[in-house]
Image: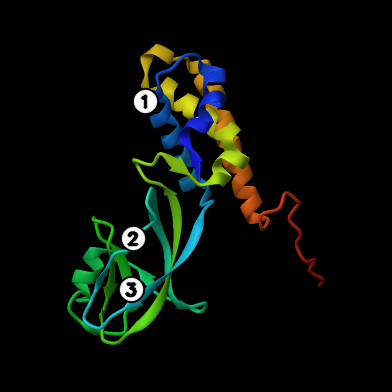
């Protein structure tokens, strides 16, 4: 894991003297937004389902937060994402059977409906990002994306603190940050490589 302080020299290089607490907040927020926009860090978490239990804690690693991307029994059988309103309207919060839907409660619990009637193991695909109080972030954010994230941190500081406000520089840093996000998404689309995407030709 990389400490937030490791990003500071890159941020200072473009913004000058800045208190540590401001720097920490800015780097953390930039890392969180970068992860949310790129879905750079994905995990598959096993979820052991028990009869009569509809609510489940995902328990992300310390310093991290999860956003659920999908819930599935296997590669071909996915549960449907829903809302609390759908659960109530369709009585999924009281019916008992094999779960076919889920939603995320306000406190972060994963809710299954109908209420399970048997044990099984589901796979929960999640995208991970730093928690709001994280002091460390995954190494890949520093090793591969520190320039873009530092630009995002500078833009955050300029947008939220009048002392360093500079619209032209904020726009420039936002552009660098957005470019890093775009590049990370392109690499993910290419299977983690920097090569061009290839498509199979179609002959008619």
Question: Which residue shows up at 44% across the image and 20% down it?
Answer: 158
* Mark 2–mark 1 CB contact (< 8 Å): no
Question: Which residue shows up at 63% across the image and 55% down it?
Answer: 189
**Residue with the mark numbered 3:** 101
Mark 3 neighbour class, 10 Å CA radius: few under 14, some 14 to 19, many 20 or more:
many
Considering only order in the chain, which callout, 3 or 2, is on the residue closer to the N terminus? 2
Q: Which mark is residue 59?
A: 2
- The quadrant of the picture occupied by the C terminus is bottom right
Mark 1 to mark 3: distance in Å? 42 Å
Foreground of the two, 124 or 143: 143
* Image spot of residue 107 (x, y percent): 24, 56
Q: Is residue 64 above or below residue 125?
A: above
* Mark 1–mark 3 CB contact (< 8 Å): no
* Image spot of residue 152 (x, y percent): 50, 31
Under circle 1, the secondary element is helix
**Residue with the mark numbered 1:** 21
Look at the image and tell me whether residue 151 can be seen. yes
Question: Which residue shows up at 20% across the image and 74% down it?
Answer: 93
Q: For this view, does 8 lie left or right of residue 143?
A: left
* Image spot of residue 88 (x, y percent): 19, 70
Foreground of the two, 4 or 175: 4
Under circle 2, the secondary element is loop
């Amino acid at each position: 894991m990389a400490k937030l302080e490791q990003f500071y020299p890159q941020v200072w290089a473009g913004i000058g003297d800045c208190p540590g607490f401001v720097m920490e907040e800015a780097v953390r927020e930039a890392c969180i937004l970068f992860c949310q926009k790129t879905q750079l860090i994905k995990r598959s978490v096993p979820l052991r389902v028990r009869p009569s239990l509809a609510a489940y804690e995902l328990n992300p690693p310390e310093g991290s937060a999860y956003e659920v991307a999908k819930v599935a029994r296997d590669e071909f059988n996915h549960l449907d994402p829903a809302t609390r309103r759908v659960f109530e309207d369709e009585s999924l919060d009281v019916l008992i059977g094999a779960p076919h839907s889920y939603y995320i409660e306000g406190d972060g619990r994963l809710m299954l409906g109908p209420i399970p009637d048997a044990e099984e193991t589901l796979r929960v695909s999640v995208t991970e990002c730093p928690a709001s109080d994280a002091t460390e972030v995954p190494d890949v954010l520093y090793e591969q994306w520190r320039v873009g994230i530092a630009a995002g941190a500078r833009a955050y500081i300029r947008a939220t603190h009048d002392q360093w406000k500079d619209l032209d520089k904020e726009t420039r840093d936002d552009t660098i940050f957005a470019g890093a996000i775009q590049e990370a998404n392109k690499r993910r689309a290419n299977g983690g490589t920097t090569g061009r995407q290839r498509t199979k030709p179609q002959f008619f």
